[in-house]
């Protein structure tokens, strides 16, 4: 059953993506400012498809920390491609920090560029940090909610990766509190995995780390929250950012 459901979902996913990419490209010719709306529709349909076809449900806790308007900075664990689309459905004006290679995908890449995401060349060293900060300024001016994956790439469940410095630089530049997020998405939608497994994907927002927190303390608190993971009791995780 899992194999059949996964095959059906992958066909649905790629078919939907192709259709909306073409539709979005055509719309961008006349109304590029609406490209983010196309991305949101795509993400909602993918999440709905995962629920209906694969039996993957989403459970969000810590909703009191979920931004409903204005600029915000979210630092999330990254386990799955699911993480790179779900925030479009949870935030009013999501702005992902993503790898620049995605902009080179035919048709989809230019469309991603028009949504106002922050594309970073991870091989550019200090230049990538400077671009991140400039684009972070722009996202704040536009009242966007920035989502960054401090680990820099997807990791396996229960195997946190080392944190990259971009989150600390972005927090210092924007002056925004950092909202840590843990998830177990990789258990249901694995990294480069064909199989999608029925069950619940948990996303937990944790209490924000105060604006102006020194870099070393910020990184230590984030690392502690990420390593505690989604399986810990809410109170235990909350203590890590106090």
Image (tube, grey):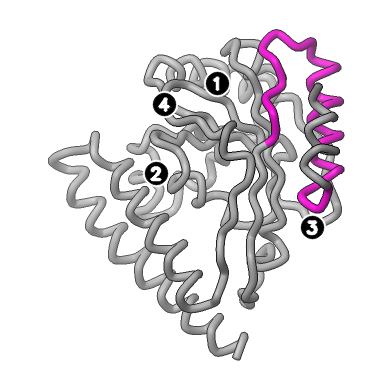
Q: Tell me which segment is drawn in magenta.
A: 206-232
Front residue of this view, candidates 194 and 89: 89
Q: In this figure, which residue is indicated by the disc labeled 2?
A: 112
Q: Element at badge 1?
A: helix
The percent position of residue 116, horizontal first and vertical second, equals: 39, 32
Whichever of labels 3 and 2 marks the residue nearer the N terminus, that label is 2
Mark 1 or 4: the one toward you: 4
Of the numbered discs 3 and 4, the one sitting upstream in the chain is: 4
Mark 2 or mark 4, which has the lower sequence index? 4
* Distance between the alpha carbons at the discs numbered 3 and 4: 31 Å
Q: For marks 3 and 1, give the CA distance.
A: 30 Å
52 to 230, vertically: above or below: below
Task: Label 4: state its secondary structure.
Answer: loop
The label shown at residue 69 is 4
**Image point 57% across, 13% down: which residue?**
174
Answer above or below: position of 48 versus 194.
above
- Packing grade of label 2 (10 A; few <14, some 14-19, many >=20) is many
Most foreground residue, 197 or 235: 235
The reply to whether discs 3 and 2 touch (Cβ–Cβ < 8 Å) is no
Whether tag 3 and tag 4 are in contact, CB under 8 A, the answer is no
Point 65% across, 35% down: residue = 122
Q: Secondary structure at mark 2?
A: helix
Quadrant for the C terminus, please: top right
Identify the residue position indicated by label 1 in the image.
131
């Amino acid at each position: 059953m899992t194999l059949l459901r996964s095959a059906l979902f992958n066909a649905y996913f790629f078919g939907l993506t192709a259709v909306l990419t073409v539709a979005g490209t055509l719309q961008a010719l006349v109304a590029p400012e609406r490209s983010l709306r196309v991305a949101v529709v795509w993400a909602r349909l993918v999440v709905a498809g995962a629920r209906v076809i694969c039996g993957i449900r989403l459970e969000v806790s810590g909703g009191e920390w979920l931004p409903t308007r204005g600029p915000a900075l979210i630092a999330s664990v990254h386990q799955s491609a699911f993480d790179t689309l779900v925030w479009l459905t949870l935030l009013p004006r999501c702005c992902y920090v993503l790898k620049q290679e995605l902009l080179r995908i035919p048709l989809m890449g230019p469309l991603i560029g028009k949504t106002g995401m922050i594309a970073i060349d991870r091989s550019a060293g200090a230049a990538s940090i400077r671009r991140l900060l400039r684009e972070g300024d722009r996202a704040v001016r536009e009242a966007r909610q920035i989502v960054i994956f401090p680990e820099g790439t997807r990791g396996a469940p229960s195997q946190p990766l080392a944190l990259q410095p971009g989150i600390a630089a972005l927090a210092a530049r924007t002056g925004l509190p950092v909202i840590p997020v843990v998830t177990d998405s990789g258990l249901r939608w694995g990294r480069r995995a064909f199989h999608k497994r029925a069950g619940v994907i948990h996303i937990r927002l944790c209490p924000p780390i105060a604006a102006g927190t020194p870099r070393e303390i910020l990184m230590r608190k984030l690392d502690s929250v990420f390593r505690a993971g989604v399986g810990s009791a809410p109170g235990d995780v909350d203590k890590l950012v106090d």
